[in-house]
Amino acid sequence: MDRLLDSAFIYVDFDGRLMTKAEVLANVELASVQQVVTEAMTASLHGNTVVVTGIFRMKGMEGGKPYLRRGRFIDVWMYKNGSWVAISSQGTLIAR
C-alpha cells in the first residue's frame, strides 16, 4: 500500500476524520477488516488524473463486535513519475 499512496495522500473517513498517508498505513495495520468488496465502480480520466467513484461493502471486527458496512467512495489517482498513485480518498456510509 505504501507504493500506491502518494506522499501527500489525504483520506477523509466516513466519520469525518482526516488522515495522512502515515496515519492510514498505521490504521490499516491495526484494523481487523476481514473483507472489502467493490460492488460498483466508474472512472473518469482528466489528463493525468483519474476520479474513481463506487460502492463498497466491508466487514470486520471493531471493539470486539462484528460489523458490516456499505458505503460510497471517491478516489483520486494521478499518473506521476511513471506510475499511478492515489492522492486523495473519501468514504461515506450508506444509511440503508
Image: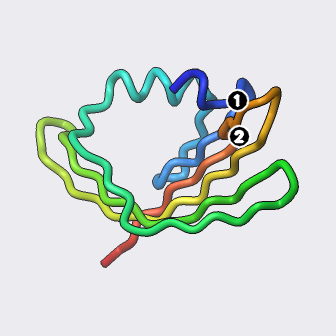
> Which residue is located at x 70 percent, y 29 percent?
6
Q: Amino acid at mark 1?
A: Asp
Disc number placed over residue 87 in the picture, else none:
2
User: Does label 1 or label 2 sit earlier along the sequence?
Assistant: 1
Q: Residues within 10 Å of mark 2 (few under 14, many from 20)?
A: many
In the rendered image, the residue lying farthest to the bottom is 96
Disc number placed over residue 39 in the picture, else none:
none
Asked which secondary structure carries label 2, the reply is: strand
Q: 95 or 43, which is in the foreground?
A: 43
Percent position of residue 65, x then y: 12, 44
> Which residue is located at x 83 percent, y 60 percent?
46
Q: Which residue is mark 1?
A: 6
60 horizontally vs 54: left or right: left
Percent position of residue 62, x then y: 22, 40
Cα distance in 3D space between marks 1 and 2: 5 Å
Q: Cβ–Cβ below 8 Å for labels 1 and 2?
A: yes
Percent position of residue 11, x then y: 60, 42
